[in-house]
């Protein structure tokens, strides 16, 4: 199991639109091979900040499977224009 972690900063005054777009986008990612679960959490202290946690069966399911798929193109179209700056994505394994 691999945990994908992304800290997301959404452009000022676009939080509601981002959250609505994410409702559509979560259907895309959840149908992907190797997808296990996800959480999108909004920061309490900083209103434009979110954390996205996605569990994958393997890192390959994310980096090779999802990110090179047609679904990822849809994901990008729905979400990537909301970010400023563009997020760094890291992968973690349980200790």
Image (spheres, rainbow, N blue to C red):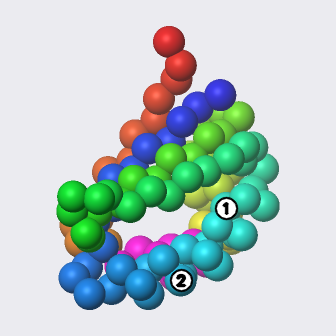
Which residue corresponds to mark 2? Answer: 20
Q: Is residue 4 left or right of residue 37?
A: left
How much space separates mark 1 and mark 2, taking CA atoms? 15 Å
Q: Is residue 2 left or right of residue 28?
A: left
Q: Which numbered circle lies on residue 90?
A: none
Q: Residue furthest front?
A: 44
Tell me the residue at 58%/57% (across/down).
67
Q: Is residue 91 left or right of residue 60?
A: left
Which residue corresponds to mark 1? Answer: 29
Using the rendered view, name the quadrant where residue 42 is placed: bottom left
Near-viewer residue (62 or 37): 37
Q: Is residue 54 left or right of residue 33?
A: left
Query: From which residue to which does the magenta span run?
Result: 73-82
What x and y, as percent, mark residue 23?
A: 61, 76
Near-viewer residue (59 or 92): 92
In the rendered image of this protein, does residue 74 appear above or below residue 57? below
């Amino acid at each position: 199991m691999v945990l994908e972690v992304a800290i997301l900063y959404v452009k000022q005054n676009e939080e509601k639109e981002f959250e609505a777009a994410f409702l559509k986008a979560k259907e895309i990612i959840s149908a992907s091979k190797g997808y296990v679960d996800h959480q999108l959490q909004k920061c309490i202290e900083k209103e434009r900040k979110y954390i996205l946690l996605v569990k994958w069966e393997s890192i390959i399911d994310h980096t090779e499977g999802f990110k090179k798929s047609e679904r990822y193109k849809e994901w990008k179209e729905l979400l990537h224009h909301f970010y400023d700056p563009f997020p760094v994505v890291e992968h973690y394994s349980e200790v």
